[in-house]
Image (cartoon, grey):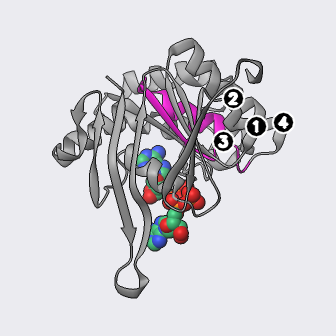
Amino acid sequence: TPIIDAKNISKAYGSGTGRFEALRDVSLRVHRGESVAIVGKSGSGKSTLMHIIALLDVPDAGTVSFAGQDALSLPAKQMSEVRNKEFGFVFQQFFLTPGASVLDNVTLPLKIAGVPGKLRKERGLAVLEQFELADKASNKATDLSGGQKQRVVISRALVNEPSVIFADEPTGNLDSATGRVVEDTLFDLNRDLGITLVIVTHDEDLAARCDRQVFVHDGVIVSESRKTEDAA
Ligand code: ADP
Ligand code: ADP
């Protein structure tokens, strides 16, 4: 069973003359443990597709299964549980809470999951340790550099031990050296922990590092390719 199986997805924004079809009858399967890049020009529908398969947004038509279960027919509470426990998110804009400490930012998904304070702190510190950020646990998230912020975001994405990480232009706000470190971290998680990666990007080099590339153009998937051995 694919971990994610999205079938015949359509999504329009706006209405009347302002109606715009962002996705038209798109199907995409993601297998457990693979890394998939969703590639295409700005405005092609990549983020919309990612938001729908990540259960952050609902399509107008089509189905999304997670681990063989029809996710869109789940009650809202269970759907948000899947999102919070099974998925980790890494966005270009970080979405960190600026005034909150690094530790509180990282442990937010645990708080949502109802994990008690002491355990949250332990698990949060353990993840921060892995990324050499434990000494920054009490700092405000705003006090960090871009690369540190994205490592905090990755720590937050990992704290619930997700099966899938969704990354939307994860290196978009970083200089190339820092971006490379963040990329390496994501691919290490894929290789070492088997975490499935779905990456939205217009960066060809980043896309080429993924097992599979899915090309989106004007709201449809126009082609797919697989990593060639020498690109690894
Ligand atoms: P990409 O990620 O490839 O840049 P998006 O999925 O973000 O593309 O957007 C696809 C199209 O849908 C774009 O034309 C965009 O302007 C439009 N769009 C995206 N989100 C909204 C929204 N919330 N309201 C209206 N239009 C939107
Ligand atoms: P893009 O520029 O890629 O289109 P958006 O600005 O549309 O991204 O924001 C992404 C969406 O995902 C927003 O609606 C935001 O609230 C939501 N989001 C961002 N981070 C998280 C997160 N960690 N968990 C859940 N939802 C998130």
Q: Nearer the viewer, mark 2 or mark 4?
A: 2
The alpha-carbon separation of the residues under discs 1 and 4 comes to 13 Å
Q: Amino acid at mark 2?
A: Arg
How far across and down, in percent of the image, does residue 34 sit?
A: 51, 24
Q: Which mark is residue 177?
A: 4
Q: Spatial distance from mark 3 to mark 4, Cα to Cα?
A: 15 Å
Confirm whether the magenta stretch covers residue 169: yes
Magenta residue span: 150-173
Question: Is 75 on the left or on the right of 222, as rendered?
Answer: left
Q: Quadrant of the N terminus?
A: top left
Q: CA distance from mark 3 to mark 2?
A: 23 Å
Residue in view at x 58 percent, y 64 percent = 43
Which residue occupies the foreground of this view, 218 or 54?
218
| Disc 1 from disc 3: Cα separation | 22 Å
Whether residues under marks 2 and 1 lie with C-beta atoms below 8 angstroms apart, the answer is yes
Locate residue 201 relative to residue 174 in the image: left or right: left
Labels 2 and 4 touching (C-beta < 8 A): no
In the rendered image, which residue does mark 3 sit on?
149
Residue at 77%, 33% (x, y): give it.
Answer: 180
Crowd tier of the residue under label 1, counting other residues whose Cα lies within 10 Å: few below 14, some 14–19, many 20 or above: few
| Three-letter code, disc 3 | Lys
CB-based contact (under 8 Å), mark 3 and mark 2:
no
Q: Residue at x 20, y 48 (%)?
A: 76
> Which residue appears farthest toward the top when viewing the image?
192
- Image coordinates of residue 158 in percent, x first then y, are 49, 27
Q: Which residue is mark 1?
A: 205
Q: Which mark is residue 209?
A: 2
Callout in the foreground (1, 4): 1
Measure how far apart labels 2 and 1 are at the Cα level: 7 Å
